[in-house]
Image: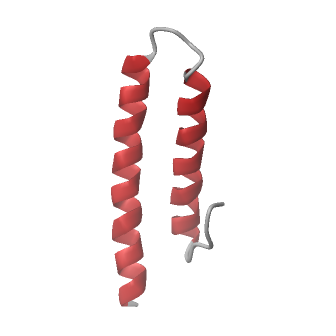
């Protein structure tokens, strides 16, 4: 993991983002997958937003 996260939920979100990065990197060597990488980038952004909301909630506690 890239940093020490707080809750289990945050750790899972971080792991999910890292897994998506690995998938996108694996797709780099394949042809005609730009549409898939674009979808994965959108999913990554959605998960990043979820993670940011969770960080805000945890900082308020």
Residue 18: horizontal and vertical position, in percent? 58, 48
Picture residue at 36% right of the left edge, 79% below the top: 57
Residues 50 and 18: in front is: 18
Q: In which image quadrant can residue 25 be found? A: top right
Q: Indicate the position of residue 9 as horizontal and vertical percent values.
A: 52, 66
Q: Residue furthest top?
A: 31
Total marks in image = 0
Q: Is residue 44 left or right of residue 3?
A: left
Residue 35 x %, y %: 37, 19
User: 7 left or right of 57?
Assistant: right
User: Residue lying farthest right?
Assistant: 1
Question: In this orientation, which residue lies closer to the viewer: 24 or 58?
Answer: 24
Q: Residue at x 37, y 29 (%)?
A: 39
Quarter where residue 51 is shown: bottom left
In the rendered view, tell whether residue 18 sits above or below residue 57. above
Residue 24, placed above or below residue 17 = above
């Amino acid at each position: 993991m890239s940093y020490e996260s707080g809750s289990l939920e945050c750790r899972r979100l971080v792991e999910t983002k890292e897994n998506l990065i690995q998938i996108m990197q694996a797709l780099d060597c394949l042809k005609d997958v730009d549409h898939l990488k674009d979808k994965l980038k959108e999913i990554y952004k959605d998960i990043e937003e979820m993670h940011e909301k969770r960080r805000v909630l945890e900082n308020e506690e």
